Amino acid sequence: MGRLRVLSGAEVCKILEQHGFVAVRQRGSHRIMQLQTEGSTVTVPVPLHDALRRGTLQSIIRQSGLAKSLFEAE
């Protein structure tokens, strides 16, 4: 298990988009990303900051349901 990389909000949005998420709206510095699946919708707010804090990134990973390895350093 590697350590989480220091990522910007835009980089996190790019990773989410590569896995099916779509930006549905933005208000101020927060972009709302959604993934439509049969019978449910996964919604993840992403702050567009230069560097996301570790806890914020962990929360985004948990909410998205994606593998933590996508956000870790090689």
Image (spheres, rainbow, N blue to C red):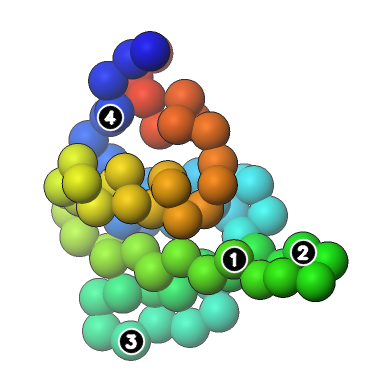
Q: Could you say where residue 44 lies in the image, as x and y percent from the top left?
A: 46, 65
Measure the C-alpha gap from mark 2 to mark 1: 8 Å
Residue 21 is drawn in which quadrant? bottom right
| Quadrant into which the C terminus falls | top left
Rendered image: mark on residue 27: 3
Type of the residue with mark 3:
Arg
Q: Residues within 10 Å of mark 1 (few under 14, many from 20)?
A: few
Spatial CA distance of label 4 from label 1 is 23 Å
Q: What amino acid is labelled 4 in the image? A: Arg
Q: Residue at x 31, y 44 (%)?
A: 58
Q: Residues within 10 Å of mark 3 (few under 14, many from 20)?
A: few
Residue drawn where x is 29% and y is 28% of the image: 4
The reply to whether the C-beta atoms of the residues labelled 2 and 1 are less than 8 Å apart is yes
Give the residue at mark 2. 37
Query: Rounded to the nearest whole Å, what is the CA distance between mark 2 and mark 3?
Result: 24 Å
Residue that mark 4 sits on = 5
Q: Which residue is mark 1?
A: 42
Numbered disc in front, either 3 or 1:
1
Say which of marks 4 and 1 sits in front. Answer: 1
Determine the secondary structure under disc 2: strand
| Picture residue at 72% right of the left edge, 70% below the top | 40
Of the numbered discs 2 and 3, the one sitting upstream in the chain is: 3
Residue 13 coordinates in the image, percent (x, y): 45, 56
